[in-house]
Image (spheres, rainbow, N blue to C red):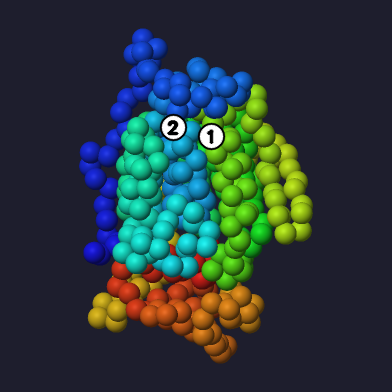
Amino acid sequence: MRLSRFEISNNFKFQKPKSKAESSKTNVPTDRYSRQILFNGIGKEGQRRLLEARAVIIGCGALGSAQAEALARAGVGRLRIMDRDFVEASNLQRQTMFTERDAAERLPKAIAATQHISQINSEVCTEAEIADVNHSNIERLIDQCDVVLDGTDNFATRYLINDACVKHDVNWIYGGAVGAYGVSMTIRPGVTACLRCVFAEAPPAGSAPTCDTAGVIMPIISVVAAIQVSEALKLLTGRLDQLHNSLMQIDVWRNEWRTINPGSPSPECSTCGLRRFETLEPATGEFAAILCGRDAVQIAPTQPTKVDFAELADRLAGAGEVNFNDYLLRFRAGAYELTVFQDARSIIRGTDEITTARSLYAKYIGN
Ligand SMILES: [Zn+2]
């Protein structure tokens, strides 16, 4: 099975929300959800809302698969799961939805996740999309949904989600984890600060640790996913008074837990203040090109930067064979070889698939 160049199908659309009259007829199975209905934050009315809710999970790795499982068990009626990758043995230590069999079969994560969900809660309607989320599909992806959960591993995609969600007034829940450290923030367009209000720019490519250079332990995944799912349940049941309204940072190894007030939407913010949605424009995305006949793909970040080769080599040392000179850094991991130039442009050898190359770039160089 070829695992990239998948397109979102044209009939890919959530159903229109139910009218009030239709919705009062929704049957709430009280036995299955009895403990959740007993919880006074949710109750029977909250459960009914969950059964009618539509959530989108973008990226179904560690965070995404934990979110998907929790939302399915909670009875969120419709889940759309998008991921560009397939299951590998190295995922199993933290990506709790997946099994050895999924890895042996190299199943796309979106497919493996929806298959498992059908066994966990067959009443949940799932849609799997195997694709690289980008400017051409993000707006269609979030159409008609009630909440978007961030399960991605890179800032480029998060700014894309932020632009699309602010533009279409959709709530989304940012989350990230690396090492033992995690972060989460709930973004309600027009009500709270957006991602770009808090972080005007992404960290320069190659400057921040990624799970593939610094590692990651499962407990921080569980914590961040739990915070994201709790926030999603509050949003979907209308309990807005219970949202944590902060940029939450947690380190389960150093035993630190803190919340920072992200403030209100900033009038100067280019996204929510000035309503410029740059990442949704085709011209501004990161540039990727297949290098014909070379079994290689070039990835060029939007904003060139100066890569510190010594620092990058240090971070990559545990993940494969690495060496560098004054002009470029070479890194070999399995069948792939990444050549990184000083401006963070990279040539990824061993594939002629843009999706695979993007994924490797995000994993090892980070953006
Ligand atoms: Zn903003």
Check contact, mark 2 vs mark 1: CB within 8 A.
yes
Looking at the image, which residue is at 62% across and 33% down?
Answer: 192
Q: Amino acid at mark 1?
A: Ala
Residue 359 is situated, as x and y percent measured from the top left of the image, at 42, 64
Label placed on residue 232: 1
**What's the residue at 23%, 42% (across, down)?**
10
User: Residue 73: image x %, image y %?
Assistant: 46, 37
Element under disc 1: helix
Tag of residue 76: 2
Q: Is residue 70 above or below residue 332?
A: above
Q: How many marks?
A: 2
Q: Nearer the viewer, residue 160 or 38?
A: 38
Name the kind of residue labelled 2 in the image: Val
Q: Which quarter of the picture shows residue 273?
A: top right
Please name the residue shown 61% across and 61% down the image: 217
Q: Quadrant of the N terminus?
A: bottom left
